[in-house]
Image (cartoon, rainbow, N blue to C red):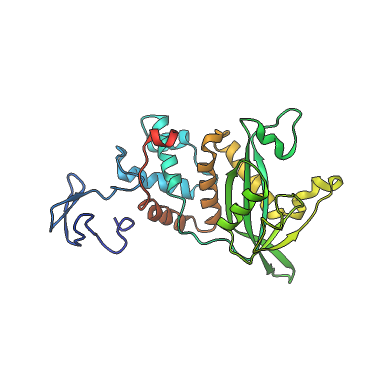
């Protein structure tokens, strides 16, 4: 209830702040207009037959277990009746991981793309995504400099953004950067033509070209975003045993949410409850369409 109404109960009909609670039906009744309101109404849990305590357990497990949790594991942990119920529950929780008011990345940013999916015979590079089972993902991660205990200059990754894209052209990359990175930031990228002057208008471009003879060392040029991509692929294959490209964006939302809160899992749990309480509900049919 605190997540749904952080400033206290507010009747959706007359905006009164006074109510009675009916424990048997788990409803709040406005003292002024007598409107009955459920604490899970107009949230991602709206219309669900799963008890609210199971939703809390699901949110706790998905945010605090280090490798994440699959639908099959969640079904077993919560004793849910079917795999489909657990799968849909997880996807609704993933919708609650997207904060529509999140602040953009800023400072020094590493940006690059990767291909999600298995190998395709006789195809290489960004052209691989023409295959129906392949997905092209663009990513951007903050990079912070610091001095370690020995006085050495080091770098570490900050916040992350990921998105599924159709093409790695300058229009698509430019749009991704404008939606996710603060103007004036420094963008580190390779020599791919998508990172053109037009795409990076408003940013400082730190281009680090990798020649064809040294392409295998590209991860040394942008180590942080390449480490992100490596961890992402390991997570998708290890925890979820592969993902249908149709639902990849939802899995990226979970990965980003967990990555950005990797040092504060308990805070991640509370944050998920807060965001999810203000997300519009979605049916299984809407989600699959």
- In the picture, which quadrant includes the C terminus? top left
Image coordinates for residue 232, horizontal then vertical, percent: 61, 44
- In the picture, which quadrant includes the N terminus? bottom left
When the figure is inspected, residue 67 is found, relative to residue 246, above or below; the finding is: below
Query: Looking at the image, which residue is at 42% across and 45% down?
Result: 93
Q: How many marks?
A: 0
Query: Looking at the image, which residue is at 56% across and 35% down?
Result: 245
Image coordinates for residue 123, horizontal then vertical, percent: 74, 32
Depth check: give the residue in front, 137 or 149: 137
Image coordinates for residue 43, horizontal then vertical, percent: 33, 48
State the residue lying farthest toward the bottom: 151
Depth check: give the residue in front, 172 or 159: 172
Position of 167 compared to 70: left or right?
right
Position of 190 compared to 211: left or right?
left
Image coordinates for residue 237, horizontal then vertical, percent: 60, 36
Depth check: give the residue in front, 217 or 15: 15
Query: Looking at the image, which residue is at 65% across and 42% down?
Result: 167
Query: Looking at the image, which residue is at 59% across and 41% down?
Result: 235
State the residue lying farthest toward the right: 213
């Amino acid at each position: 209830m605190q997540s749904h109404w952080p400033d206290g109960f507010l009747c959706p009909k007359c905006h009164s702040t006074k109510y009675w609670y009916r424990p048997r039906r788990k409803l709040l009744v406005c003292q002024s207009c007598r409107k009955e309101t459920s604490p899970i109404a107009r949230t991602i849990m709206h219309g669900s037959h799963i008890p609210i305590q199971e939703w809390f357990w699901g949110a706790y497990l998905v945010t605090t277990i280090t490798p994440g949790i699959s639908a099959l594991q969640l079904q077993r942990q919560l004793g849910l009746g079917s795999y489909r119920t657990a799968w849909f529950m997880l996807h609704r929780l993933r919708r609650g991981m997207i904060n529509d008011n999140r602040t953009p990345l800023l400072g020094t940013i590493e940006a690059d793309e990767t291909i999600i999916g298995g190998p395709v015979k006789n195809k290489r590079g960004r052209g691989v995504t023409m295959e129906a089972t392949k997905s092209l993902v663009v990513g951007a991660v903050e990079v912070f400099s610091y001095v370690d205990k020995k006085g050495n200059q080091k770098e570490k990754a900050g916040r992350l953004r990921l998105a599924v894209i159709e093409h790695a052209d300058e229009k698509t990359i430019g749009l991704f950067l404008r939606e996710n990175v603060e103007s004036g930031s420094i963008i580190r990228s390779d020599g791919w033509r998508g990172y053109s002057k037009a795409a990076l208008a408003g940013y400082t471009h730190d281009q680090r070209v990798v020649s064809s003879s040294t392409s295998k060392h590209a991860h040394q040029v942008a180590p942080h975003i390449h480490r992100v991509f490596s961890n992402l692929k390991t997570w998708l294959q290890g925890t979820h045993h592969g993902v249908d490209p149709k639902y990849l964006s939802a899995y990226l939302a979970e990965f980003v949410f967990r990555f950005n809160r990797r040092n504060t899992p308990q805070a991640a749990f509370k944050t998920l409850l807060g965001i999810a309480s203000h997300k519009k509900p979605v049916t299984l049919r809407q989600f699959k369409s």
